[in-house]
Amino acid sequence: MATSTQTIAILGAGAWGSTLAMLAQAQGHRVRVWDRRTAPDLAGVLQGAEVIVSAVSMAGVRPLAGAVQKIGIPPQAILVSATKGLDPVELLTPTQIWAANFPNQAVVVLSGPNLSVEIRQGLPAAAVVASRDPWAATQVQRALSSDRFRLYTSSDPIGVELGGTLKNVIAIAVGVCDGLQLGTNARSALVTRGLAEMIRVGSRLGARPETLNGLSGLGDLLATCHSPLSRNYRVGYGLGQGKPLGQVLAEIEGTAEGIHTAPVLLKIAAQHGIPVPITHEVQLLLQGQTTPVAALARLMERQLKSE
Ligand SMILES: NC(=O)C1=CN([C@@H]2O[C@H](COP(=O)(O)OP(=O)(O)OC[C@H]3O[C@@H](n4cnc5c(N)ncnc54)[C@H](O)[C@@H]3O)[C@@H](O)[C@H]2O)C=CC1
Ligand SMILES: O=C(CO)COP(=O)(O)O
């Protein structure tokens, strides 16, 4: 399905970066991968790249964007961000950081229900590529779409980016619910009210509500809240079982962004006066300031309201 062979640089060779590299290679592209751990020459990886995909954890976005800016990239290169997180320093999304470093470059966000383990097994998945520049989104769609990875375009990058980011916090909450063995009704209520919280935050920050009802919102929420493959869900599950956060993290390989997203999201919500009761309880739990049972009781005892 790819239109022509392109040179694609993948920055970050964790679970997601290496999966994206695999997908790009399968489409016949020239793929170069950079990772801080193996540390090949970043300048060499960027040289001549037509598409540059950042798949590092949120913690790596700011330093990486700075390093890439210092080196410089081809003027026509499209930057793609696959990170799902929020910056604790300036409360920005990953693409906002990339755009600030590269104001004249096309920036695209890639997000959706994409548990990397399943994609590496060759199972089918879909995602959204969103940008203010429709040409750039279409280029990335054509470059990376295949018969097992179906990409849709969107002109709502903030909605697509927040969908993937906010669901991580809700996935922790749903994991707690399942760790407490509270049943299907409770989990369904939490997923639905979690989506309402995501839409409330997203729309205040400029997202279209319908975007959050799409693949990178509801879709990703369903994937993440229903799979033990999700690290965020597993963090919550462990906490729900009464394990301390340190132990839970020691048992999980890789990044659970929701842990770092929750405090940033709380700050943003406070600035904008947005009620985020689920995120609030998740953060108290992560800080060890409440127990799963007490957090749940507070959510159930909130003032009665209409849906
Ligand atoms: N694994 C998955 O299924 C998916 C993950 N994502 C998102 O992709 C991002 C990366 O996730 P994973 O690859 O799964 O995590 P991972 O824990 O497997 O890998 C993290 C990557 O970030 C890099 N990194 C971390 N801190 C850095 C720093 N300070 N400077 C430079 N690089 C740094 C690491 O070297 C590594 O390449 C996260 O934001 C995650 O939410 C998105 C979709 C699917
Ligand atoms: O974002 C993901 C799936 O779309 C990956 O979820 P976890 O980071 O919770 O493993």
Image (cartoon, grey):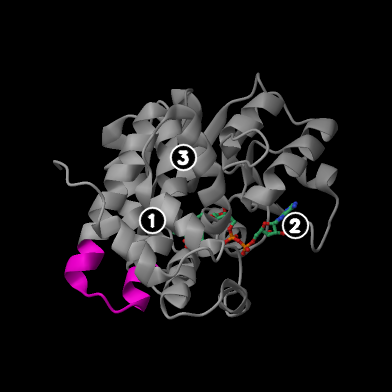
- Contact between marks 3 and 2 (CB within 8 A): the answer is no
CA separation in Å, label 2 and label 1: 29 Å
- At a point 15% along the width and 43% down the height, the residue shown is 307
Q: Amino acid at mark 3?
A: Glu
Counting residues from the N terminus, which is met first, the one under dot 3 or under dot 2?
2
Q: Give x and y (percent) for residue 88.
A: 64, 42
Counting residues from the N terminus, which is met first, the one under dot 3 or under dot 1?
3
Instruction: Determine whether 78 is above or below 174 in the image.
Output: above
Counting residues from the N terminus, which is met first, the one under dot 2 or under dot 1?
2
The foreground one among 98 and 18 is 98
Using a 10 Å C-alpha cutoff, classify the residue at mark 1 as few (fewer than 14 neighbours), some (14 to 19) or many (20 or more). Answer: many
Instruction: Determine whether 273 is above or below 1 in the image.
Output: above
Q: Give x and y (percent) for residue 157.
A: 45, 32
- At a point 35% along the width and 43% down the height, the residue shown is 198
Can residue 260 be seen by looking at this rendering?
yes
CA separation in Å, label 3 and label 1: 15 Å
Using a 10 Å C-alpha cutoff, classify the residue at mark 2 as few (fewer than 14 neighbours), some (14 to 19) or many (20 or more). Answer: some
Residue located beneath label 3 in the image = 161
The quadrant where residue 86 appears: top right
Q: How many marks?
A: 3
Q: Is residue 190 left or right of residue 105?
A: left
> Looking at mark 3, is its residue's CB closer than 8 Å to ligand 1?
no
Q: Which residues are magenta?
A: 175-188
The foreground one among 71 and 184 is 184
Q: Which mark is residue 35?
A: 2
Q: Which mark is residue 170?
A: 1
The residue tagged with tag 3: helix, strand or loop? helix
Q: Is residue 73 left or right of residue 131?
A: right
Using a 10 Å C-alpha cutoff, classify the residue at mark 3 as few (fewer than 14 neighbours), some (14 to 19) or many (20 or more). Answer: many
Which residue is situated farthest in the left direction here?
306
Q: Is residue 182 magenta?
A: yes
